[in-house]
Image (spheres, helix red, strand yellow):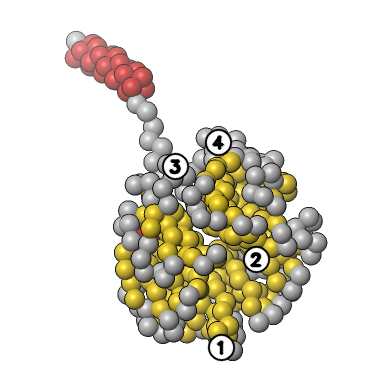
Amino acid sequence: MELKILIINFIIIIIITYFIYDYISSTYTPSTNNATPKEDEYEPFKNNILVMSNDLKTLNSYSPNEDSYWVGITFVNNKFIAVGDSLNKSGYNIISSTDGITWTFHKKDIRLNAVTFGNNVIVAVGQSNDEYNVKRSIDNGDAWELIESDKDCTWNAITFGNNKFVAVGNNIMTSADGSTWNIKKFGSFIDLYGVLFTNINNNPIYIAVGSHILKSTNGDDWTIVSYDNTNWLYGIAYGNNKYVIVGSKGAIITSIDTNTWTKQIIFPNTTWYNIIFDNNKFVAVGQTTTGRNIMTSTDGIDWDPVVYNTDNTYFSIAYGNNKFVAVGY
């Protein structure tokens, strides 16, 4: 009798469990917060290239390829060159254009984060595919070759000055030709996202920003600059006798000598990813929840938002042929 009761109770538990599971399965929607889309399983990247007029009053967005997103852009030899990645295995990671509207595509191989030009060579850097994390072109971006560097490093930004390329990420590396690289390893205490070279009054200096501000006179020997480092820093530009760094939570940090830095907060709900100085003004781009993801200033202190209704995030911006072009996803 007791065995029969046990069997009946067991069957009842199974039936109840089945109905609970069936109900949960029919009503539960998995969360997509912080999810990384898989290749070929993603929403298209729309309107992720923004072309703006000289005065930033005429803005038009384009989607040259909805499989790809773009992280870095430069203007060289009458051509915009943008780099990024594709979530489609047969997608593209480099595009080029003279007007920001019609683009030429190059097949994907590695994820690229930044691109620059020097010594008649275009160099793009990014994340390793277990062997390569650098690409270079010696024919103005028409053909590209993969270059080996430290496969354990991720490179987020690159600049050129004093006949030297300097790339930064979780380490720093330098090269004269974009092909042979020397790596300066710092360990795990730095993570850098922006780098700039200036030569003001015959005073050459490289400045790298991220978790810290670092500076160097030769690209090889670096010192850490003290400042209020409660924000991540992503981009740096120089103009009108002033260095301007942008970063997370609306951070704007300025200096006239690279030794003393002053921080202010502009639009705290915005993360500013990149900044340039061209056409006599600073222009910064980023990500926001308030619609203020582009702003401009002549002095780096007083800023005006560029009104543009978009949900896109912009990672980088360049100027050429009398227009600004911003890229993102």
Q: Earlier in the sequence, mark 4 or mark 1?
A: 4
Q: In the rendered view, does 29 fall on the left or right side of 178?
A: left
Disc 2, SS: strand
Q: Is residue 210 in view?
A: no
Q: Nearer the viewer, mark 4 or mark 1?
A: 1
* Image x and y of residue 292, in percent: 38, 50
CA distance for labels 4 and 1: 48 Å
Q: Quadrant of the N terminus?
A: top left
Disc 3, SS: loop
Residue identifier under label 2: 116
Q: Residues within 10 Å of mark 2 (few under 14, many from 20)?
A: many
CA distance for labels 3 and 1: 41 Å
Disc 1, SS: loop
Query: Residue 189, located in which quarter of the rendered image?
Result: bottom left
**What residue sits 42% from the left and 42% below the top?**
309
Q: Nearer the viewer, mark 2 or mark 3?
A: 3
Residue identifier under label 3: 310
